Image (cartoon, rainbow, N blue to C red):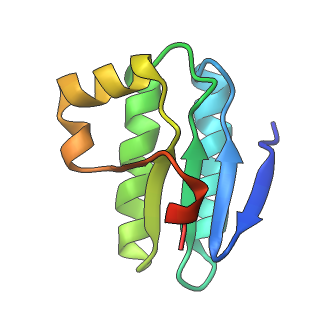
């Protein structure tokens, strides 16, 4: 499974599908591991189309955050919709993960 990727400044912006199921979760973890091997990797997930955020989605976000921190990289979520904002707030992840709404914040 491939994810559309755009390079913006020093960041890689990955477009996520509307639902993160088991197959997407595994493919996304593999892509994160691949990108984490780059010098100072910076990855943003475009979650604007995400219609459901279950434990798999939350788990892969935490995985990305921790792995990239170990590689002196950075991670954020771009353009979370209302569903995403609500879940991030309820789980407290909005205090851990960077949530951005404008591409100019990818610097």
Q: Residue 91, position in %: x, y?
A: 20, 28
Q: Quadrant of residue 36?
A: bottom right
Q: Residue 58, position in %: x, y?
A: 38, 32
- Closest to the observer: 32 or 40? 40
Relative side of 48 to 6, left or right: left
Q: Residue 61, position in %: x, y?
A: 42, 42
Residue at 45% across, 26% down = 56
Residue at 50% across, 14% down = 52
Is 57 drawn above or below residue 62 in the view shown?
above
Residue at 63% across, 42% down = 28
Q: Residue 78, position in %: x, y?
A: 52, 45
- Closest to the observer: 21 or 82? 82
| The N terminus sits in image quarter | top right
Relative side of 83 to 34, left or right: left
Relative side of 45 to 56, left or right: right
Residue at 48% across, 25% down = 81
* Residue that lies at the very extreme toward the bottom in this rendered image: 39
Is 101 drawn above or below residue 73 in the view shown?
above
Give the tally of numbered discs: 0
Is 99 drawn above or below residue 39 in the view shown?
above
Is 101 drawn above or below residue 50 in the view shown?
below
């Amino acid at each position: 499974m491939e994810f559309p990727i755009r390079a913006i400044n020093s960041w890689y912006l990955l477009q996520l599908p509307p639902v993160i199921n088991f197959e997407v979760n595994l493919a996304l973890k593999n892509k994160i591991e691949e990108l984490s091997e780059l010098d100072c990797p910076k990855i943003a997930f475009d979650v604007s189309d995400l219609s459901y955020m279950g434990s798999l989605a939350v788990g892969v976000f935490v995985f990305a955050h921790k792995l990239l921190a170990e590689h002196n990289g950075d991670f954020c979520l771009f353009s979370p919709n209302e569903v995403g904002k609500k879940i991030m707030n309820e789980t407290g992840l909005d205090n851990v993960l960077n949530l951005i709404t404008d591409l100019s914040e990818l610097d």
